[in-house]
Amino acid sequence: MMVGQLRALFMAICVAGSLAALWGLGGTPGERAAIAAVVATQAWLCIGFRRRGFPAWSWLIEGGALFLAAWASHYAVPAVVLYLWVGARALYGGLPGRALGAGMVTAILAAGVPIAGVGALPTARSVVIALAVLAAAHALAGAARAGDIAAGRARTAAAAGARLAAAATRAEAMQVAVQAAVDMTSDADAMIATVNGPSLRVAARARRRGAAEAASQANSDELWSRIDALPPGVRGVLAGDGPAQLRGADARALAEAVGLRPADRAVLAPLAMEGKVFGLLALVFDRRADDPSGLLTTLADEVALALDNLLLRSRLSVVVENSPDAVILASDAGIVRFVNPAARQLLGRDGVLLTGGDLCTLLSLTDIAEVLPAPGGASRQPVRCRIPTGKAAEWTDVDVMAERVTEHDGSHSLVVYARDVSERERLELELRHAQKLESVGRLAAGIAHEINTPVQFVGDNVRFLRDAFADLQQLCAAYAVLAGAVGAGTDTAGPLREVETVAAGADIDFLLEEVPAAVSQTLEGVARVAKIVQAMKAFGHPGTEEKSEADINQAIVNTLVVANNEVKYVADVELDLADLPPVRCHLSDINQVILNLVVNAAHAIAAADRGRGVIRVSTRVADGQAVIEVADTGTGIPAEIADKVFDPFFTTKEVGTGTGQGLSLVRTLVVERHGGHIGFTTEPGAGTVFTVRMPIVGAAARTAELVEAGR
């Protein structure tokens, strides 16, 4: 661009100046011939200007025409015409052409001494001026050409940067880079090679002719080289020593190893990311006036960044495409932009149908309000939602989490993650029910004993009542005989003696005293059995996935009945149950929590071996939460294991007596299933207090507030 402008300026000055210098000539035939020769030369210069170049022999023709003009006019043509000509022509061609032009103008001026008798001193002065003009034009042309090259390289680099950013694959990015290197240097071959174990693999090449080649299209023998067989300069670049230049045999060895044309020079720049070199970018050429090392290093840095981004993008794509969790990208307005295969499978719809849809059709407005973080706010924890799917079930339980992100163009988007937990919840429900049945199984012997005691005395009392009833039947029969004798008016002495004998044998006074007591004891035993059965039924019920309002105090009472045989031999149980509002919860989970804590307390007291202890179970309302405390006078928890008691499979009991699942299950049921909190305070050697806090929601929360206010 700058060279073109400079040529246009010099051409205009040359034509205008030459024509002005000829003003006043033409009086003689020789002068007219000189004018014709100069005009023809100017016309030729204009043609070359339009064509943007001149043939190599043009210097001779132009010089001959100007010599003819000088000779014909007896050197009346001013020397300025030669100055202007040599200045304009010096902007074209290379150094050999300019040297020829210098010789031509020197010869033309020197010929004036013998032909026209021009003095030697004026001739020398004119030669110096002409050569100075030529040198100045040569310098200006070089500067302008350098500026054009720099501008062209900048444009090429900018275009390469845009193509690198738009490249979809690493292979495409590397071919863009080598082609850009060739375009910016014009007379060099370029290649990119990456480290693959002990070898260097050529990934992309571009030759001087400008046609980029994929390495896979070349002979495989040309594309792989062992690193230890390459020149030391190459190994230094790969070792992290920075850019390097190779000359002579080393440059030719590299060119041969990577399948490029033999060359005397090579410039290498490392491809590195975070200080780790993973390849190199190389230019090979014969000779250059400027050093391309800086250009190559800059391009290599851009390529390394682009390749790293593409690798990251590729890995991210693999992760997203193969993620078992649904991933949905939506605009800030909720318009779906992308869904991964897991999302398509979960929602039971094709990606084309989902893209462009509204996020609100996938989640309810209530769920969206709970899931989406506030603008500028931190991400929220996963929220349990139910979404419509194309599966057999109309609704599926999922854990949903959303984040607001800023994309590369500055726009804001929503990333929604959803995990199908319906199967997991089904398995967890079955597992919890199995664990409850396992707990019941462990307590079965004690429960059987608890039932056996009342059943025994109920059986004894029933047998006593059976015998008593038999005696009463005999007495009633004797009374019937006596009544018959009285009615018939016959002798009643015999029947009366029989009545007295039977009554004495039955011990009527004893029966009148003991039968009511036996009946009362039987009813009490039946009631105790019924209580145990009802407690077992309430404890062992599998429950449902929907939370419901439940009486926590009654759950505690039922659980203590079930666990009575585990507790009664080692501790006394004290209850301090406050008035609790109904708590929305999974009642079967709460039963399990209380059972595990109470049994754990009984075992701690037994391990303390200090005689009978005390287990105190209390409830209260605090800060809108239902609080359950289970305190014991057992061994306490040593400080060194205090942070492990809720870990799965952690136990201090002997092998075979503990699984390490009791407190771990308690934490899962309280924290994860109910959003509550469990903690403990302990004093080694004195005992431990476990505290469970359960959130109270809805009407129950309002009731709790009224209870607290009344206190």
Image (spheres, helix red, strand yellow):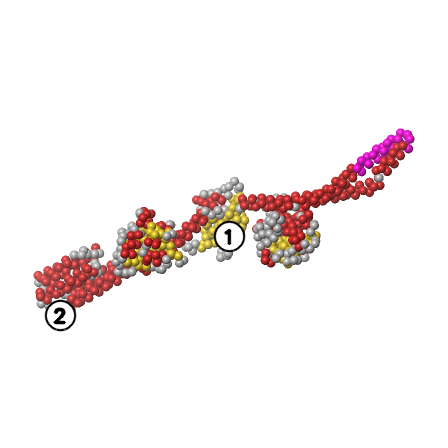
Q: Main secondary structure of the magenta part?
A: helix
Residue at image position (91%, 31%) is 491
Label 1: element kind: loop
The answer, for residue 240, to whether it is visible in the render is yes
Label 2: element kind: helix
Q: Amino acid at mark 1?
A: Leu
- Reading the image, the residue beneath label 1 is 372
Q: Earlier in the sequence, mark 1 or mark 2?
A: 2
Q: CA distance from mark 1 to mark 2?
A: 93 Å
Bin the neighbour count of mark 1 within 10 Å (Cα to Cα): few under 14, some 14-19, many 20 and up. many
Cβ–Cβ under 8 Å for marks 1 and 2: no
Check the picture and name the quadrant holding the N terminus.
bottom left
Q: Position of residue 232 (x, y in %)?
A: 32, 57
The answer, for residue 20, to whether it is visible in the render is no
Residue at image position (91%, 33%) is 493
| In-image side of 327 versus 291 (left or right) | right
Bin the neighbour count of mark 2 within 10 Å (Cα to Cα): few under 14, some 14-19, many 20 and up. few
Q: Position of residue 90 (x, y in %)?
A: 20, 61
Q: Amino acid at mark 2?
A: Leu
Check the picture and name the quadrant holding the C terminus.
bottom right
What segment is highlighted magenta in the picture? 467-493
The foreground one among 235 and 572 is 235
The foreground one among 703 and 440 is 440
Question: From the viewer's perspective, is the residue at label 1 or at label 2 nearer?
Answer: 2
| In-image side of 118 versus 509 (left or right) | left
Residue at image position (27%, 57%) is 248
216 lies above or below 71 = above
